[in-house]
Amino acid sequence: MVRLWLAGGWLALLLVAAVFAPWIAPQDPLAQDLFLERLPPVWAEGHEPGYYLGTDSLGRDVLSRLIHGARIALIVAILAGGAAALIGSVLGLLAGYMGGWTDRVIGRVIDVWMSFPPVLFAILLVAVLGTGLHSVIIAIAVIDWTRFARVIRAETLAQSRMDYVASAVVIGRSRLGILATEVVPNVLPTILVLLSLEMGIAVIVEAILSFVNLSISSDDPTWGGMIAEGRTQIHFAPWVLVAPMVALFFTVLAFSQFGEGLKDRIDPVLR
Amino acid sequence: MSALLRIEGLNVSVGRGGPRLLRDVSLSVAAGETHGLVGESGAGKSMIGKAIAGVLPRGIAVRSGRILFDGQDLTALPRRARRRLVGERIAIIPQDPLTALNPCRRIGGQITDRLVHILGWDAGRARARAAELLDEVAIREPGRVMQAYPHEVSGGMRQRVLIAAAFAAEPALIIADEPTTALDVTVQRQVLRLIGELQARHGTALLFVTHDMGVVAKLCRSLSVLYAGKVVDQGPAARIFGPDPHPYARALIAATPRYDRPEESLMPVPEAVIAALDAEVAAADRDWTDG
């Protein structure tokens, strides 16, 4: 319960920061000021008022970039995670419930898909689709739907062997009806948990793609881009690297813990 | 007396030419009568019930034989007509009350499913009937139980709910697939008595699947003893439990714990009996070719 609230609290904070970024951020995230380069954070000596987490090598405010970066991180998490969940769950449900050749075809596609190294696959896809946020989102969804499909297929298979599915068959309910009332509600907790995990993964993948400069333009603040820039400054201004890494770490942790907490909460058997 | 359910030469196998799970099974159940299906686990008892209801697991199918229900051959009926007939007239009390109720749905809806989907009752009427049924299976607060989720009530209560659901649409035949196996002994007795009472009141025929000879002795007028999917003995309970039973039936009776005579030790089925049965099964398989 505690972890659900802690993780949910962090995610809520992030959401507020992302939605209201232009009003919350103390500085313009893109404004460069070479007179204010590599300012230390507010608790260190030599800081300037208004620059709470210091500045990077171009004099841009780290906190403001972090807040604007949360926007991109969350957009990717929600859209890419949601799309992967949708594609994967639908295919997983189909494969698990229909069985037969549907299952065999989807199963083989999953096997083939998962044999590609995911990050390499993502880089390849983005290279083909062209850099940009939409490519990142598409790439993550196209790669990670298998995470959902595989697990949901197995859960659906287990569900469709349950006696309550058999009795629904006996009383002549339609396949779609059985899927909707007997199967989907029972796999929904799993979908939500996976979605939460996937959102964390999407944030990381976006950061990796930003790190190798395949996400949106390097001016725009992304956590991965900030880490890439911070890396070159690690000896002079470690906070430029540390701040986005901490944000990334807590966000991914929060997503996974939120998913686990949610499972305990919504699974009627565990409740 | 004409039979409500008559199975003739039923063969069920895994895939075409695969191993046979039911070997030329024939049996009949008259309206309002109780027929016991006994045998060890894996003998194919549940498979018979599944074949009748048309919910055989994937890859397992009826190869030959007829399942006549009220004069109609279920295996020959088109899918839709069969579902309708089975849905209206045959119900199942499943073995495990844990997996038989959907954990995500309230109990009330799971009892009324059959009434709403098959008989086309409106929700209010179905709910009133469900409350009545729960009352009939001795559940004290039907209203509260109908609002509850399955995990919120005890195992015995879940089994009562399933019994109520089975009797809901006044079926002509109920297949009780080891309805007491997952329950503890005291609850077992109550549930058995309950099924007996309801059956007598509603005039329902019962196909009672169990491995417990004690239960069969109490409940069934006639029974079939199965071994490896083959009926090895069949007849009125009075004869099978009489002075000169089939050796296998005798062995099964000897292997049943008697709470009233704990000093008698349980006897495993003798090797010789098993060997004779295996020979019988092998002989039957030699004559059988998969059409």
Image (cartoon, coloured by chain):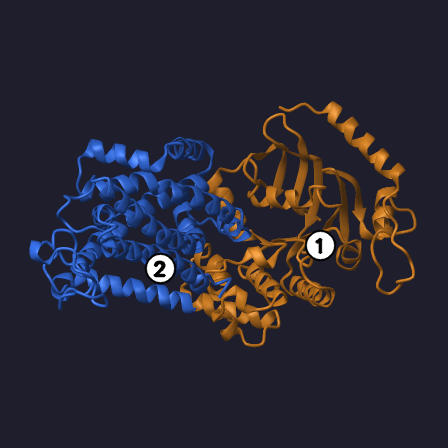
Chain colours: A blue, B orange
Tell me where residue B113 appears, x and y as whole percent.
47, 58
Q: Chain of mark 1?
A: B
Which residue corresponds to mark 2?
A254
Identity of the residue drawn at 33% across and 52% down: A200
Q: Chain of mark 2?
A: A
Identity of the residue drawn at 84% across and 51% down: B255
Q: Mark 2: which amino acid?
A: Ala
In the rendered view, does A167 fall on the left or right side of A261? right
The image shows a total of numbered marks equal to 2
Which residue corresponds to mark 1?
B34
Tell me where residue B152 appears, x and y as whole percent.
53, 69
Element on which disc 2 rests: helix
Q: Residues within 10 Å of mark 2 (few under 14, many from 20)?
A: many
Kindly give the residue lying farthest to the bottom in the view shown.
Answer: B141
Dividing the picture into quadrants, the one containing residue A133 is top left
**Inter-mark Cα distance, 1 to 2:** 59 Å
Where is B41 relative to B193, above or below?
A: above
Tell me where residue A124 appears, x and y as whole percent.
26, 32
